[in-house]
Image (cartoon, rainbow, N blue to C red):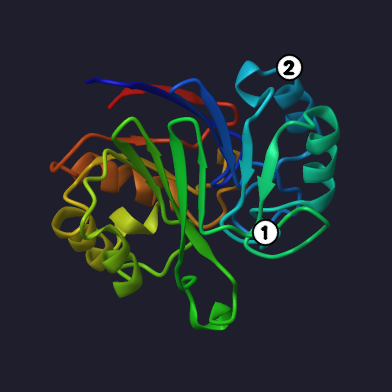
Amino acid sequence: MKMKVTVTLSANAGVAIHIGGYRIWVDALHTIKQPGFSAVDVPLQRRMLQCEAFADPDLILYTHCHPDHFSESLTAEAQKLWPKAKVILPERQADGQIPEFIHSMNGLTVRFVKLPHEGQQYVDCIHYGLLIMVNGKIILIPGDCAIGAPELQKAIEECRIDLALLNFPWLTLKRGQDFVDEIMKSPQILLYHLPFERDDEFGYRVAALKAVQKWKHSKVQLLWEPLQTLELEL
C-alpha cells in the first residue's frame, strides 16, 4: 500500500517528517553556524514558528549533539511549547532526555543504530542513525555516519529501505555511490546537509547538483532551501 510522506527542511540536516499521522523532527534545532554551512538563525526560527510542518511534534530526535545538529536551548523552548513531545538524544543533556535503542508508539517504531561519525577527529562522538518504520515503510537517516560504514551495512542488510535522507557526500563520493546502489539498493533519496546559497563558500551545492544530475539508479531530490517541503509517495 502506498503511503504519503512530507519532509520539510530547517537547515543543514534538520527536518520535520510527517508520515502516518506522526510528526517527527530530526536534528531540526541548532543555532551554531559552522564554516560552509547554515544554521537555524533567529529569522528562520520565527518563520518556523509560523510553519505548520514545525508545529505540535510527537517526537524530537537527534542523531548526535554536535552544534550543527542540536541546540539545548531551542530544544528546551520546543518542550515548553509542546510538552507532549518526546525528546530522545544520544547523550543525556537534561533530565528526561535519555537515549533509547527502540521507541514504539501505536504503529510507529524508531530504531536507533549506533554508527561511527565521519572523520577520524570524531571517533569518540556518540552518534546514532535512525530507522523510522510506519506500516511497513522504512525511512533511513544515517546522520553523519562514515560513508560506507560496515556498521550501517549490518544494520540495514535485512531491511528494504523506502526512503533515505543522506548527507550529500553519499552521492558525490564513489564509495558512497556504490554503497547506495549495492547495499541500500537505491531507495528514493533526499540529499541534504547542504548550506543555503548565501553560505556556500566551498561549492558544496554545485557538487551536489552535479551528482544528482548524474544519478540514474533511483529518484533523488535536493533538500537545500529553508522550509523547503517535499511530498513523496512510498
Q: Residues within 10 Å of mark 2 (few under 14, many from 20)?
A: few
Quadrant of the drawing holding the C terminus: top left
Q: Residue at x 24, y 51 (%)?
A: 159
Is 204 located above or below residue 45 in the figure?
below
SS for dot 1? loop
Task: Name the disc covering residue 231, or none.
Answer: none
Nearer to me, 108 or 39: 108
- Residue 72 appears at what percent x and percent y? 80, 52
- Quickly name the residue at label 2: 50
Nearer to me, 39 or 14: 14
Label 2 – label 1 distance at C-alpha: 26 Å
Amino acid at pointer 1: Gln
Q: Residue at x 76, y 48 (%)?
A: 31
Q: Residue at x 33, y 40 (%)?
A: 138
The image shows a total of numbered marks equal to 2
Is 120 located above or below residue 127 in the figure?
below
- Classify residue 93 by image quadrant: bottom right
Q: Residues within 10 Å of mark 1 (few under 14, many from 20)?
A: few
Q: Is residue 31 left or right of residue 3?
A: right
Is 217 located above or below residue 201 in the figure?
above
Task: Name the disc covering residue 34, or none.
Answer: 1
Amino acid at pointer 2: Gln
Quadrant of the drawing holding the N terminus: top left
> Badges 2 and 1: C-beta atoms under 8 Å apart?
no
- Residue 174 appears at what percent x and percent y? 23, 65
Nearer to me, 229 or 124: 124
Q: Is residue 38 left or right of residue 217?
A: right
Point out the tag, 2 or 1, that comes first from the N-terminus. 1
